[in-house]
Image: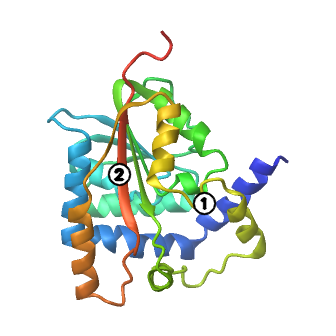
Amino acid sequence: MTQDDELKQIFHSGWTNPNVVSHRVERFLKGEFGFPLSRTAWLEVLRQTVPGEARRKIADMGTGPGTIAQLWAELGHEVTGVDFSATMISAGQAAAKERGLTVDFVEADVEAPPFPEKTFDVISSRAVLFTLPHPGYAVARWTRLLKPGGSLVLIGENNPTDPEKLKRQYRPAPGWEPDEAYRRALDILPFRSHTDEMVRVVMEAAGLRNIRSMPMQSVMDARSEHEKQDPEYGVLQGTPYVLTGQRIEDMDG
């Protein structure tokens, strides 16, 4: 077994744990993204990344319980959510059904998703690059899955530097404690601690053009209001980013 296989096995064990899945559902799907002001703000940010009224074919990589996939579906697009955790996918299917949204979920490794090249108009991913042994390979592969003119939308968080904010941000999944092997595996990951500027460089290296950083003030304002209304919830204390870039040319040409 290679080191990559060992890492993925360790993370698969963690991300299929029912307590971890429930935590993701409660903290993000029903938490931040369920808070009305935040949901409206995030919908508007995603709408701006893909302007126009046309219905797009979209894949959300590392979708977890479908947090971003469901926003795309709410905007009227044809959506596929991809994740290697069957438990996460089951949670996403249940949440989508509850909300009357159509999302096709596929269980797969997002570093090697099982789709032909030039399949999607848009590929998105939120808070996934830091979990991958080879985030650069993943971005390159996702870029090739885009149709010429398609957009890659990468969503993440610049971590806070203030110690108090870091402490307030940390919310482990109740009932699950990562073991030493999991902690060591995290330390190996190249994007464990990264910034949006590092992501931009990887996007450039993959050949994407017209890379834009989306305005996030409305999301930050919604987080502030969420924290006022529910101080114990513990909204993320960093600065969210959304970067979008286009596959302009036929890369085989």
Residue at the image position 57 percent from the left and 40 percent from the top: 138
For label 2, the crowd category at 10 Å Cα-Cα, with few meaning under 14, some 14 to 19 and many 20 or more, is many
Residue at the top extreme of this rendering: 253
86 horizontally vs 43: left or right: right
Q: Circles 2 and 1: CB distance less than 8 Å? A: no
44 horizontally vs 204: left or right: left
Q: Which residue is mark 2?
A: 242
- Amino acid type assigned to the residue bearing label 2 in the image: Val
Up the image or down, 39 lies above or below 111; here it is below
Q: CA distance from mark 2 to mark 1?
A: 18 Å
Does residue 226 appear anywhere in the picture? yes
Residue at the right extreme of this rendering: 1
Point out residue 141 in the picture as x, y percentages from the top left corner: 55, 32
Between 110 and 219, the one nearer to me in the picture: 219
Point out residue 209 in the picture as x, y percentages from the top left corner: 38, 29
Labels 2 and 1: the sequence-earlier one: 1
Up the image or down, 235 lies above or below 108; here it is below
Point out residue 65 in the picture as x, y percentages from the top left corner: 44, 61
Q: What kind of element bears circle 2?
A: strand
Up the image or down, 136 lies above or below 238; here it is above
- Amino acid type assigned to the residue bearing label 1 in the image: Arg
The answer to which quarter of the image holds residue 225 is bottom left
Mark identifier at residue 192? 1
The answer to which quarter of the image holds residue 217 is bottom left
Does residue 85 appear anywhere in the picture? no
Residue at the image position 80 percent from the left and 50 percent from the top: 3
Residue at the left extreme of this rendering: 53
Mark identifier at residue 32? none
Up the image or down, 48 lies above or below 18; here it is above
